[in-house]
Amino acid sequence: MTKLPNWDYFSERLEDRKLLTRAVPIVCDGMVLDLGVPLGGTRLGGHVLLPTLRFCREAVRQLKHLKGFPHLRIIKVDGGYPHRVEWGEPEPDTEDEAVIGRHYGYSEVAIAKFVTEHAW
């Protein structure tokens, strides 16, 4: 079986790994580009990064009727890559990595590891 993109990333970080049972592969032009992980438990928001607005629209089409993907929206990056499809609550407006990690439902262990590895 082929592993889905970002499966290991989320498996290593999510507080509630059961969310992966409802994760959705984002397929565009026959390619699996990313993994949409639904909201639940402490996970209040999510997003996928995609190279084109067309792919973003396709991702929204794939997710819009599924449980765990409320308030879908496309965030266009002018002249750049990547564009984003977001769902749930917007990412907190802070530079506090622990707050951001909790927003995405990451475990305290994963957050502490990230903060330690990225400390100045």
Image (tube, rainbow, N blue to C red):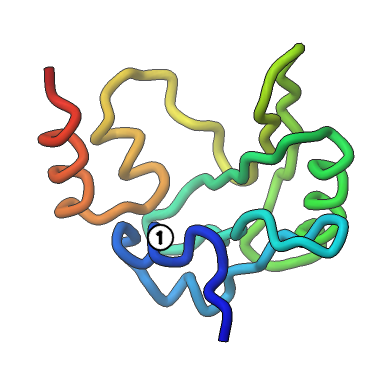
What type is the residue that disc 1 sits on?
Phe
Q: Secondary structure at mark 1?
A: helix
- State whether residue 16 is above or below residue 110: below
Q: 70 or 33: which is nearer to us?
A: 33
Give the residue at x 68% y 55%: 33
Label 1 crowd bin: few (<14), some (14–19), many (20+), radius 10 Å: some
Query: Is 70 displayed left or right of 99 in the figure?
Result: right
Q: Which residue is mark 1?
A: 10
Query: Is 13 displayed left or right of 43 in the figure?
Result: left
Q: Position of residue 115 (x, y in %)?
A: 17, 34
Q: Position of residue 109 (x, y in %)?
A: 15, 54
Give the residue at x 19% y 29%: 118
- State whether residue 118 is above or below residue 24: above
Q: Which of the 4 image quarters holds residue 83? A: top right
Give the residue at x 57% y 61%: 38
Query: Is 58 displayed left or right of 78 in the figure?
Result: right
Q: Residue furthest bottom?
A: 1
Q: Quadrant of the N terminus?
A: bottom right
Q: Quadrant of the C terminus?
A: top left
Q: Position of residue 27 (x, y in %)?
A: 77, 61
Q: Which of the 4 image quarters holds residue 51? A: top right
